[in-house]
Every structure is written in structure tokens, then in C-alpha cells.
Image (tube, coloured by chain):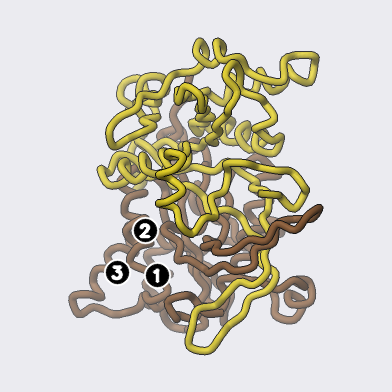
Chain colours: A brown, B yellow
Amino acid sequence: MQYPNGRRSSAKFNHSTNKQTVYSNRGMTLEDDINETNQHYLANNTAIIHKKPTPVQIVHVDYPKRSAAVIKEAYFKQASTTDYNGVYKGRHIDFEAKETKNKHSFPLNNIHQHQIDHMKQVVAHQGICFVIIRFHATQETFLFPAESLFIYWENQFSGGRKSIRYETLKKEGHIIPVRYQAKVDYLSVIDSHYMKNGGKAYGGTRPE
Amino acid sequence: MQYPNGRRSSAKFNHSTNKQTVYSNRGMTLEDDINETNQHYLANNTAIIHKKPTPVQIVHVDYPKRSAAVIKEAYFKQASTTDYNGVYKGRHIDFEAKETKNKHSFPLNNIHQHQIDHMKQVVAHQGICFVIIRFHATQETFLFPAESLFIYWENQFSGGRKSIRYETLKKEGHIIPVRYQAKVDYLSVIDSHYMKNGGKAYGGTRPE
């Protein structure tokens, strides 16, 4: 598909009306796996995390009598935030998910400056913020903390690499375990690396 | 406008392409005021709170050569969550905003069961959750905590009122001050009623 600004995105949107067929041909996308994981978390009352709707600029709507309003002209807008957010053990969770077909590194042009700006704001306000990165070839999925991402992001503007090496992701990130119902069980990584004392240090008490 | 399910909503969406003209004729909506307030909070690094995009089911997209993708057929979907969320002083913030033309009460049919379900989940996970209610006639705007809303919501199914009286909102809710740049300064209410000790009791420390 094509954005208003002319950039192409391969896997981000899924506009097919016949999802079953598509999925059986090509396997689940990272987005599908995360949505399923979030549904599982929700059903088990583990966390309340949702994907934000795709932002659309609506230009023209028809209101036929006795049937649903039809949007007849609209355009994709660039999101001003990350795609996923919610709450877990009293903490605000905020992340972006990206899949790459590269085998040895994650190209930083998968991320946009305005997303980095948003992530910095979230971190400054004590949210838990990260990127989920999947290597398509191996199906390995990493949680890479926003705080680490910022360093590689800034480095590229002072002569540094335009991508993050696989080895770096493995060393500074955390591999996300694949579980039967939580296909991308990122909360287990949050538990180990952000929630010492079972989250009690951060969760606080209930508002009165 | 009309939803796919046939219900009508008067003020929720604004599809006009000529907003300036519309606004000058009828004044700012509650949504406009909240968006402006959130922009002000963001610009001052007070809080990171955004409105979620309107959820749309996309059916058909055209990809003309050398220009932006055009959505040619799409439908409004019902949101599965509240409209606004984000992070403030380490706490997850989640709310819905509703304007009523009633003068003496807020009709509960402005809220949907699935929104109540979502709000209960957020509260259970220690998010700060509430409804912002504006009386169109007086332009008074209240913050009504989700915990109080749940009581009136449940009561209606056992013979209770189908609305919340203005006096109840005034007594159990909190009037939101109008400020020059923060037209709906709901964070001042959060500070007074949810953030004793300046939020330190709840904010916690930074993740490592």
C-alpha cells in the first residue's frame, strides 16, 4: 500500500476482506500475533493493552437512508504516536511493533522521528516504552527498550550505523518467548526487566 | 451521522472539511476543547494524552499511480475502548468525554456497556479512569470518576434512574476549571483528587 506521502509500507495494514484465506497462505503477521496476545491478556485479566485504530482523514461520507453511513473518500494519515498502549500492574505501557526481512540488522528507517519524539515523552513520564522487532527469516522476536533505541537513533546522525545489528538486539534487547496463547509474550519480559518486586515498586496503590 | 448498527450519534464525529467556518458558527465542541488542552499539556511536557483515531473498517482502497492511496469504501466501527488515554506522572490515564443538551441530568445512554467493561478493566489495573461530562446549556464541565459511574450504571438495571442528576455530578464529581490554554484543565482535578503527595505515592520510580 501507499501512504499519502508516497512511502510504501508492506505489512502494516491489512485491508483484505477475506483474512482467513490470506493468513493460511502466508502465516500470521507480527501484528496478528500481538493482537492475539493482547486478546489473551485481556481475557485473563492480565493487562489492558489495545492497538490504536489506523488514523484516517475522512473527506466524504454518504448517508444512505435506512442503511449504514459509507465513507466514500478518505486518506491514510501518519500516526502521531506508537501503535499500542495500555496499562499493566498500574504502569502505562507503550510500544511500536516492526517486522524486518533483513537477516543481520534492523534498519532504523522503520521508525520515524515523530515516533521517537513520542517515545521520549512517554519515558520522561515514567511509562514503560519499547519496540517489538521480529526477524521474518528466523521468526525471532525481540523486545528492545526505548532507552536503548534512542542511543542508536541519535548515533545515526553523527556518522553511526543506519541500522541496529542482530547481535546488538540480542545483547541489549530481550528475546520474547512464544507461548501457545500468548504468541508474543512480551509481558513476561516486562516482568523480568521492568517489574522487580513483582511490580509493587512501581504499581502504587489505588486512587481514592 | 449513522452507525453501521443504525444508531445515531450527533456530536461524536466531525467530518467537515471546512472546520473553521463550522466552528465560528457554533463554538468549540467539548472534543475540540479537550484536544486543545491535550496539545497544551504536551507542549508543556505536563502529560502525554492523545485521542484515539476513529475506528474505521476499510473495505476498498484505490492505489493511483504517483499519488496517495484513496480509501473508496469504509464504514464506522464502534470503538472497543474509551476515546482518550495516556500517561501522567507515571499513572495511566483513560477517559471518555460526553456533551449533553439536557439541563438537569446526564442520560446514561450516552455511555455503552462495552465502555463500562473497558473502564472497569482499567480501574482494576490501577489506571485513573473517569468521564468528562459537559452541560451544553451552561458550559459547565465535570470530571466524574469511573468508580462512581459504575454505581449509577448498575443501578439503572435494578429500577434506578436512567440518568445521573446534575446535583449528583456536582456533589460526587468535580467541576473542571476553564483556563486560557487548558480549556478543560482536568489534570488539576487529577492532582487534587488522585495524586495526594503530588503523585509521588503513585508515580513510582523509573524502569531500569
Q: Chain of mark 3?
A: A
Q: Is residue A122 above or below residue A12?
A: above
Residue at left offset 41%, top offset 59%: A80
x, y percent for residue A108? 37, 75
Q: Is residue A190 above or below residue B58?
A: above
Q: Are marks 2 and 1 on the same chain?
A: yes
The disc at residue A177 is none
Q: Are marks 1 and 3 in contact (CB under 8 Å)?
A: yes
Extreme residue in the left direction = A158
The disc at residue A153 is 3
Q: Secondary structure at mark 1?
A: loop
Q: Could you tell whether B159 is left or right of A164 in the image?
A: right
Query: Closer to the camera, B118 or A193?
Result: B118
Type of residue at label 1?
A: Ile
Residue at left offset 61%, top offset 55%: B55
Quadrant in the picture for residue B131: top right
Residue at left offset 48%, top offset 88%: B66
Type of residue at label 3?
A: Trp
Query: Closer to the camera, A119 or B10?
Result: B10
Q: Are marks 1 and 3 on the same chain?
A: yes
The disc at residue A146 is 2
Q: CA distance from mark 2 to mark 3?
A: 10 Å
Q: For the residue carrying disc 2, how many other residues have a C-alpha within 10 Å: few (<14), some (14-19), or many (20+)?
A: many
Quadrant in the picture for residue B185: top left
Q: Earlier in the sequence, mark 1 or mark 3?
A: 1
- Callout in the foreground (1, 3): 1
Q: Could you tell whether A33 is left or right of A68 in the image?
A: left
Residue at left offset 29%, top offset 69%: A152
Q: Could you tell whether A145 is left or right of B4 in the image?
A: left
Q: Circle 1 is placed at which residue position?
A: A111
